[in-house]
Image (tube, coloured by chain):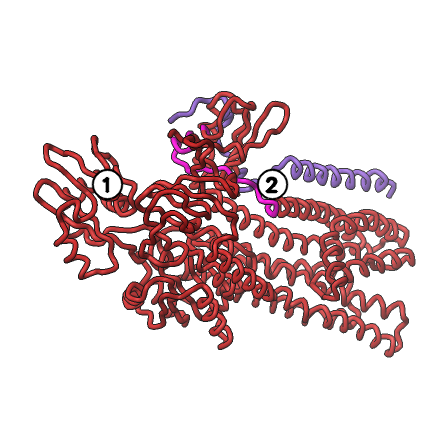
Chain colours: A red, B purple
Amino acid sequence: MQATRDFSLYVKNLGSGLSRIDLAVEGVSCAGCMSKIERGLAAIPEVTLARVNLTDRRVALEWKEGALDPTHFIDRLAELGYKAYPFETAGAEVAEAEQSRFLLRCLGVAAFATMNVMMLSIPVWSGNVSDMIPEQRDFFHWLSALIALPAAAYAGQPFFRSAWRALRTRNVNMDVPISIGVTLALATSVVETLGHAEHAYFDAAIMLLTFLLVGRYLDQNMRRRTRAVAGNLAALKAETATKFIGTDEISEVPVAAIRPGDTVLLRPGERCGVDGTVIDGRSEVDQSLITGETLYATAEHGSAVYAGSLNVSGTLRIRVSAASEGTLLAEITRLLGNALQARSRYVRLADRASRLYAPVVHATALLTMIGWVLAGATWHDAVITAIAVLIITCPCALGLAIPTVQTVASGAMFKAGVLLNSGDSIERLADVDRIIFDKTGTLTLPDLDVVNSANVPKDVFDLAGRLALASHHPVAAAVARASNANSPLAGIVEEPGQGVHGVFNGEEVRLGRPSFCKADQLANEILSLDPEASVVAFNRGDAQYVFAVRQRLRPDAQATVSALQARGIMVEILSGDREPAVRAAAQTLGISEWRAGVTPADKIGRIDDLKRQGFKVMMVGDGLNDAPSLAAAHVSMSPVSAAHLSQATADLVFLGKPLGPVVAAIDFSRKASRLMRQNLWLAVGYNLLAVPIAIAGFVTPLIAAAAMSGSSLLVMLNALRASRVVQGRF
Amino acid sequence: MEVLVILVPLALGLGLVGLLGFLWSLKSGQYDDLEGAAWRAIADDDPAHERPSD
């Protein structure tokens, strides 16, 4: 049985004889990588385009149709030292990119109009105090109208549409006061120009749109970028399955190309990419990514197997089932649906601010108008003053206050190894006062590790590692990894279910079950001390050694837990694993609150309990069984090795082996949240200063323009501080 | 002040040229990869016709 890899699912035919594929590439971070990849790929004949996108960490490739197989590119990139995998652009990502472009186009139009209207306004402002004749002023005002009106009609679309959507559902968002303010300012200016008046507000209205579009674009760009990162993570998991395309013919295809009813082959050491039922074979499977349970389960004819399970010993044939057939999965899907509904009730800081803001602004403007009429002013003057109030209070700085901080903070978190999956997670993360960790794969590393390597001589360990390279068994793989072995021994034979053996320097060497290596007694001694470990024995000539293999805590888990506790955050463990294993981890880490053998429903129950007590809970987990609780928690985080569904549900994803990014994320988000609030207060403070001047009727277009740009600049500069967090200060 | 008849359309025209230039650059995808573009400016020319060095 020879497997071929088939990526035709991802190849797009562009017409005109060209094919195109997009690859997500891991580890592209600098200009050097960029040119290395582009040169390496462009050197392949028939390739017409190879272009790296450094922002999204992707490569676009085009070649003459039919001339090359996409696997060729992936192999070439692997030779260059980069892991790559094709991906399918999700519909949501295309929409985000399109929206991002639209906002940038609006921003371009608004900025062009602002510059040109300003160019006309400055002569008017200076002319008003010198010798400008009214006809010239009118001419300049009309020219401003000519530029500002069409530009506002185009560039204001994002605000007008969103305001209209909100009003239709009887809601108020920030875009309602913006739309009303801009429209009224423009309309009044036209009326004033018709009446040959001294002041017109075309410049203020269009400048307001420009500043707000900057904020809107930053916000959108951050969302687009997080989505691109999430898409890459999903693609780089490179989930493939070995599918039977004939009775005895197999092909390696991406999981996305597998349909219910297909039959797939699962060899020892492989992770299952699909859900299904075993139709042939017998094996042990490690379901820790699904249930958190570290003891292996037996899989035989009729057993259900879930995506994410690791096959340990035998080869299995699996009939793929539709996604929701399995009882466990159906339960998790149901819980997840409920939890997601609950989560959408969170109201973002910006929306909360605008709910307060809009009524206050409109009431102030109305009161100003009534006040001036009562004080004996003409209706015309009263309306103009009220509109000046609307313009000066328009939430320019408010619109920038939050997106600028988010952009800077998310960039800093990205550098610290934390990726954002959702835009508002920063502000939710800042509130957290309780963290629930899953144990398996979250507090511990996802891969097995040898724990007693210090008790085994170095040369023996190295030899065992080289021998282990011949086996696919996960425990053997752990020995190979721990000894950094990279040169396999020749002539090694595998005894299925027993181990591997061969000859080295005239001596027989064996690696496998203790009974296979005559090391039962030694193994029992180790197991009696550490019942949670798996053992693998090594025999060389007459000498026997036994390795204890188990999941190890992340290297900085203890430091991270104490750092979190030092920040006033209570930490607890909820695990699906058995009690002794969970208790041992909790004791090592100094965590007093822990529960073992917890089901997904119990996890949600515990989170709901804590929520009712008023805690803001963060869930950190990786298993499929954690997905519903990740959605139920106030905010959630997953390691990059997590199950697909969990990673998609989590608000944040952290990279690498250490657990430290959890603390970094908390620190950055707390700082960011403080800056957001500071910015909102700065904006409010500016209004407190400017509004009385507007109510008194002293606001000229010059003052409006200066105040608006001044406050926006202040807020943006303050936001830049979000990238600096002194570790340990909070 | 008759000079305004020339200067005003000229200024608007130049602004419009700038705007059209921006829209063109947006349409041709020049804002899709801002990080990469920063590095490309200082990269060596013409990667397509060179053999890989490694």
Quadrant (top left/top right/bottom left/bottom right) for the N terminus of chain A: top left
Q: Is residue A529 magenta?
A: no
Q: Which residue is mark 2?
A: B31
Q: Which residue is mark 1?
A: A468
Q: CA distance from mark 2 to mark 1?
A: 50 Å
Mark 2 or 1, closer to the camera: 1
* Three-letter amino acid code of the residue under disc 2: Tyr
Q: Is residue A611 left or right of residue A541?
A: right
Q: Are marks 2 and 1 on the same chain?
A: no
Q: Is residue A82 magenta?
A: yes
Instruction: Indicate the secondary structure of the residue bearing disc 2.
Output: loop
* Range covered by the magenta-colored residues: A72-93
Badge 1: few (under 14), some or many (20 or more) residues near its Cα, within 10 Å?
Answer: many
| Residue A348 visible in the shown view | yes
The one of A598 and A646 positioned closer to us in this rendering: A598
Q: Quadrant of residue A730?
A: bottom left
In the image, residue A361 above or below residue A508? below
Count of numbered badges drawn on the protein: 2
Chain containing the residue with disc 2: B
Badge 2: few (under 14), some or many (20 or more) residues near its Cα, within 10 Å?
Answer: some
Residue positioned 63% across, 51% down in the render: A217
